[in-house]
Image (cartoon, rainbow, N blue to C red):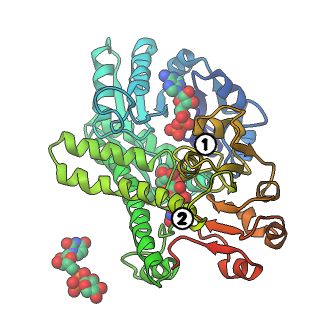
Amino acid sequence: MKICCIGAGYVGGPTMAMIAHQCSEHTVTVVDINQARIDAWNSEKLPVFEPGLDEIVAGARGKNLFFSTDIDQAIRDAEMIFLSVNTPTKTYGVGAGRAADLRYIEKCARKIAEVAENDKIVVEKSTLPVRTAESVKRILESNSNGRKFQILSNPEFLAEGTAMTDLQAPDRVLIGGDQTPEGKLAIQKLVDVYATWVPRERVLTTNLWSSELSKLTANAFLAQRISSINAISALCEATEANVDEVAHAIGTDSRIGPKFLKASVGFGGSCFQKDILNLVYLCEHFGLPEVAAYWNSVIEMNDYQKHRFSHRVISAMFNTVSDKKIAILGFAFKKDTNDTRESAAIYVCQDLLDEQANLAIYDPKVEVEQIQRDLGIDADHPNVSYCKDAYAATRDAHAILVLTEWDEFKALDFQRIYDQMQLPAFLFDGRNLLDLEALREIGFEASGIGKG
Ligand code: UDX
Ligand code: UDX
Ligand code: ADP
């Protein structure tokens, strides 16, 4: 089968690479309007950093995996077309700040309607509001001219940083489609693709709407766990409790489980906030304001947690960070990715810049230009410098903020760092990554999240 994927981003690229790697009998072409991105996918330095991705792409590229900007040709050739374009939160008009911006998805649907010469199976891979498949279907059907289109929803559950292992051994693959004979046939075609390497019982099939809603719900539940433990972290700081101990104690209840209970400076990433805002918008649309408010509080708690962290830093440092050098260790929204979308680091840095601090930023994978775009600053902003490692960032600093849990930060020589800092040497661990007791023995004024 010939497969095409529109959108060569964090989801489309790795997912299609895995399908090509696992299914040598299928040919996969990933297309994008962004020429630079496609060039990067065809080069030695891929546009997405994911452990294990380089090897998988190198093994399949040029054999049954292709990256191209010839979108029309790829659509014409393919029997199955994945839509993996971005669906950011709308920034304009009705639903601004909450609803998903579906213009890229709609453009793709119209493109398929325009160029397809025969029947197609169209698979939604991007996270979309419930009933988007309906809109895609209507656009395709009203322009069908005798061609038949089947729409499937196949949400992606991979997490960045572990994308390749998540794709290799997913907890489940979810495929939603029409419950008509043609719909079931299309579902089966996609099931067969995944069944090449995913145990059949892990491939779940549902109707279209359940599949779309399951993706939003899964992300809302995951984010809710983080906001719940972060809420408790504030209480821990006000008392003598330790949030890591509380998380461990509750996580041993098999009904709760141990995962996703790590208190932090706040969750980031392209999905959680966007999907919850989407869910909130959907609830309001269907006249369910109480349900909307419930889920919106997950976002409110996350915003609170990010700003609470900056306020703690400022208040500990004698209520002023003006002109003080603050080392920012980590800018990505989590470790093992170069992605900064919605990273808590952006908000914390902005709070500190508002207070006229001097920031020295180091992240092992994030590009300097990306940081500048995220902070909305020029390359020559006088209060921000970019460092090649943690030692340079911490030289003469008044404080260190750990904002991403990169493994390499655990292996730093903190005595060496302490010796080159201003005193008192503050360290705020926004990820509960470091051994605070050991740091205090060196002399640091060290504090974490949710530790009294
Ligand atoms: C609860 C805790 O489970 C227990 O660990 C603690 O020590 C005391 O409080 P209990 O109230 O006896 O125990 O029963 P539980 O099984 O937790 O159910 C509480 C309520 O939640 C019931 O009304 C139950 O019907 C409801 N429930 C439970 C749901 O509506 N849905 C569920 O999925 C689970
Ligand atoms: C998430 C979902 O996990 C994934 O299934 C979905 O397909 C996309 O959204 P991702 O955003 O890539 O994946 O990363 P994830 O590991 O979920 O982390 C999201 C954010 O939550 C990160 O900022 C992370 O640091 C934070 N987090 C996660 C916590 O603060 N505490 C935790 O216990 C777990
Ligand atoms: P995600 O995390 O969902 O993969 P990304 O922003 O990383 O999101 O990737 C989405 C990709 O989709 C981008 O590379 C963008 O250029 C591409 N894209 C958006 N609209 C179109 C379109 N109409 N045709 C082809 N590619 C598109």
Q: Position of residue 439 (x, y in %)?
A: 72, 77
Would you say the residues marked 1 and 2 are in contact, meaning their CB atoms lie under 8 Å apart? no
Mark 1 vs mark 2, foreground winner is 2
Residue placed under numbered mark 1 in the picture: 14
Q: Position of residue 43 (x, y in %)?
A: 76, 31
State the residue at coordinates (31%, 56%): 297
State the residue at coordinates (41%, 30%): 122
Q: Is residue 230 above or below residue 442?
A: above
**SS for callout 2:** helix
* 226 left or right of 24 in image: left
Q: Is residue 342 above or below residue 423?
A: above
Residue placed under numbered mark 2 in the picture: 315
Residue 7 in sight: no
Please, which residue is most extreme toward the left here?
287
The image shows a total of numbered marks equal to 2
Q: State which tag comes first along the sequence, 1 or 2.
A: 1
* 13 left or right of 396 in image: left
Q: Position of residue 412 (x, y in %)?
A: 79, 67
Q: CA distance from mark 1 to mark 2?
A: 43 Å
Amino acid beneath label 2:
Ser
